[in-house]
Amino acid sequence: MKAVVFHDVGDIRLDNVEDPKIQEPTDAIVRLTSSAICGTDLHMVRGTLAGMVPGTILGHEAVGVVEEVGSQVRNLNVGDRVVIPSTIGCGYCMFCRNGFYAQCDNANPNGPQAGTAFYGGPQPTGPFDGLQAEYARIAYANVMPVKLPENVTDEQAIMISDIFPTAYFGADIAEVEDGDTVAVFGCGPVGQFSIASAWLMGAGRVIAVDKDQSRLEMARAQGAEVINFDEEEPVQTIMELTGNIGVDRVIEAVGVDAQRAHSGPAAEEGEQMEGEFQTELNRVAPETNPQGDTWVPGDAPSQSLLWAAQSVMKAGVIGVIGVFPPQAMTFPIGTLQQRNLTVRGGNCNHRKYMPKLVGLVATGALDPTDILTQTEPITGAIEAYEAFDRRQPGWIKVELNPAA
């Protein structure tokens, strides 16, 4: 079968690889009908998230049709259409039973303290071959995949494999409630769904911060008040818009601000990485920021986290869903303490939220395909990665079609 395979930092290829096989009685083999490229995939390709094993198939978002089931998969039939969660959980440990599928004790073969297991990730996450392929082995298929109603399309369902539940998780841990004013930092795909999730949870106002005009236009179309941080200082503007109080809640959908890997065509052209936010966000903070906190040059926290801590009201809540590598060790702790802030973050427990989101789409309450801007055949995956990495105008979310 064809699959997108990691060979080295900056080196991914569309290879012919062996078809997957049942390895455990709880496995299933799924013929993939839709996959996608995520900003997290770019972190692996660039080396921001280290430890990728050469030969690993990339991708952690997929929809498909069940082709084969193990002896202990008692809830699926061959021919069922399913959406596959990006993160993997056993379903029976104490963490899964409490909805913390991303902290499953059993899914990660590196042990119960190893952290989240997910498809297409580095060695510390498993590794598990990913979902940018024609077929995939799905672990714990007796628990994880969610069956799809006939009226939910592949294009809708692929949004529910990762980015929509991740955004909903962000609004959940930020404790968004009726009437809240919510700031969303980062208007990429997850940020767009964070805006939608804040509305679903009853937000009264949503303020969206980014610099990419196409993303800001998409946020404005959702009813968000937009701020271009390239044109105005975002914390000051948020304070002006909120009567100098700040927002009630922040969803941080930016994550690590890393340089593009020093390899591949984009690096040769000398372009900067344009991940969930642009690289210039990684600039060293000034000695004293607007809240009066002093930082040591070179040891500054992520700019987005600093803005989040400064723009949320006293005793407010910040939900962090942007991707940070394990070596990220800085945070504006002084601002957090002095302003009695609550910060919650983590990897999304996808399986917890997916049935509800599938139901919302099935009823017509929302259509997540507004975020989907490109559909490419898997044979064009490498070119799609390059275009997505450069953030060519309008490239916000890319679907890969393994059957094309």
Image: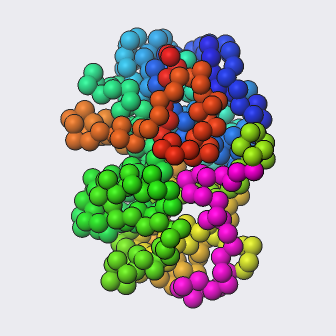
Q: Does the magenta-highlighted stretch encompass residue 212?
A: no
**Residue 132 is drawn in which quadrant?**
top right
Span highlighted in magenta in the image: 270-295
User: Looking at this view, is 132 or 14 the one in front?
Assistant: 14
The residue at 59%/25% (across/down) is 380
Question: What main secondary structure does the magenta stretch of the protein show?
Answer: loop
Provide residue 43's location: percent of width, then percent of height: 65, 46
Residue 235 vertical position relative to residue 126 in the rendered view, above or below: below
Q: Is residue 281 magenta?
A: yes
Q: Nearer the viewer, residue 302 or 108?
A: 302
Instruction: Say above or below: 297 vs 367.
Output: below
Q: Quadrant of residue 5?
A: top right
- Residue at 22% x, 41% y is 365
Residue drawn at x 64%, y 64% as measured from the top left: 280
Q: Name the residue at the bottom extreme.
A: 292
Q: Position of residue 314 (x, y in %)?
A: 41, 81
- Estimate the x, y position of residue 33 in percent, counting from the top left: 46, 20
Q: Is residue 290 visible?
A: yes
Residue drawn at the location 46% of the way across and 80% of the way down: 236
Q: Would residue 97 be found to the left or right of residue 358 on screen?
A: right
